[in-house]
């Protein structure tokens, strides 16, 4: 009786199984599930932000004015969170802030992690002069006072565009993760399957990005989750100091307007919502990072 051999699984099927196993482990962490739930809520806010301005121009978060009010008002059915010192709807500003927080946080984190991953892979694999050059550059960037540099740039230009903020966060944030990824690559490049790939004639580019890179993706994703949190807080801080993008409304700018117009203690419905949104959105990405860390480190998962 002949035995039927199972068909070998394709690389696509293997990756699909790995993704399914990762999702199962992620659900078991609970922290990540809570974080995703919070993020889904803020994504919903970002999507809803397009609706009020389309219904009435007075709900435009930056330029919309209600002709029925002269300035600051208390919450009402017409304005659920009231209006600011110019008569603009605060609820529309809160929704608009969620959109830009997600855009800035995600874009800055993706750019930072992409740069740090590439540098870590190249530095760890080649070693020698390439490693020394990249690591000394990373040391120099890490020694720079990031917030001071941004403040100087903001003072000179009087404001920093939103994409310039993303660029500055990316440039100043890549050294730390790149060193961790480099240390992982130093171990991976000595594995037998890497040596086999090198002997079989694979190019360095293929070895780095085809055989080594998939093994450092979990670490990259972990730093990306924490990077979104850092980027959101960084942008909110700049906006609160009056050095953010003047053409958009963010949560930090809402807090800045509330503080500068001296409604800090008399208008909690203006001050508290953006503050809570910043806290909960950064908490969500922190929880996702914790969940990812538990998947990477089985000892944490067993606890």
Image (cartoon, helix red, strand yellow):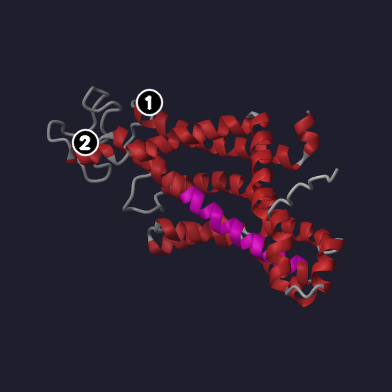
Q: Residue at x 23, y 22 (%)?
A: 77
Total numbered circles: 2
Q: Name the residue under label 1.
A: 268
Q: Mark 2 points at which residue?
A: 87
- Image position of 216 (left or right of 41): right
Q: Which of marks 1 and 2 is nearer the N terminus?
A: 2
Q: Quadrant of the N terminus?
A: top right
Along the line of sight, which residue is nearer the eye, 97 or 215?
A: 215
- Image position of 3 (left or right of 171): right
What numbered label is drawn on residue 132? none
Q: Quadrant of residue 97?
A: top left
Q: Position of residue 87 (x, y in %)?
A: 21, 36
Q: Residue at x 57, y 62 (%)?
A: 171
Which stretch did the figure color magenta?
104-124
Image: 171 above or below 62: below
Q: Which residue is drawn at 34% across and 25% down?
A: 266
Image: 265 above or below 191: above
Instruction: Give the main secondary structure, helix, strand or loop, of the magenta stretch.
Output: helix
SS label for mark 1: helix
- Image position of 124 (left or right of 42): right
Neighbours of disc 1 within 10 Å: few (<14), some (14-19), many (20+)? few
Image: 241 above or below 149: above
Along the line of sight, which residue is nearer the eye, 80 or 292?
A: 292
Q: Where is residue 203 in the image (x, y as percent from the top left)?
A: 73, 74
Q: Position of residue 90 (x, y in %)?
A: 30, 34
Q: In which quarter of the image is the C terminus?
A: top right
């Amino acid at each position: 009786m002949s035995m039927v051999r199972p068909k070998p699984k394709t690389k696509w099927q293997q990756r699909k199984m790995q993704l399914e196993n990762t999702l199962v482990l992620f659900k078991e962490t609970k922290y990540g599930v809570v974080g995703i739930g919070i993020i889904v809520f803020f994504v919903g806010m970002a999507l809803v932000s397009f609706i009020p301005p389309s219904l009435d121009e007075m709900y435009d978060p930056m330029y919309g004015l209600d002709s029925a009010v002269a300035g600051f008002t208390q919450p009402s059915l017409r304005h659920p969170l009231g209006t600011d010192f110019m008569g603009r709807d605060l609820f529309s500003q809160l929704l608009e802030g969620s959109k830009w927080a997600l855009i800035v946080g995600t874009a800055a984190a993706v750019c930072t992690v992409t740069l740090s991953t590439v540098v870590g892979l190249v530095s760890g694999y080649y070693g020698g002069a390439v490693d020394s050059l990249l690591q000394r550059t990373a040391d120099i960037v890490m020694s720079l006072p990031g917030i001071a540099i941004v403040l100087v740039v903001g003072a000179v230009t009087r404001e920093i565009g939103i994409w310039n903020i993303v660029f500055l966060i990316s440039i100043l944030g890549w050294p730390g993760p790149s060193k961790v990824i480099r240390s992982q690559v130093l171990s991976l490049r000595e594995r037998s399957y890497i040596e086999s790939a090198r002997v079989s004639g694979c190019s360095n580019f293929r070895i780095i990005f085809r055989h080594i890179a998939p093994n450092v993706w979990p670490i990259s994703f972990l730093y990306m989750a924490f990077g979104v949190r850092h980027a959101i807080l960084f942008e909110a801080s700049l906006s609160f100091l009056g050095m953010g993008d003047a053409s958009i409304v963010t949560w930090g700018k809402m807090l800045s307007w509330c503080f500068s117009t001296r409604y800090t203690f008399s208008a909690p419905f203006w001050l508290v919502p953006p503050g809570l949104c910043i806290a909960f959105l950064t908490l969500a990405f922190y929880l996702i990072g914790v969940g990812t860390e538990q998947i990477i480190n089985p000892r944490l998962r067993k606890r």
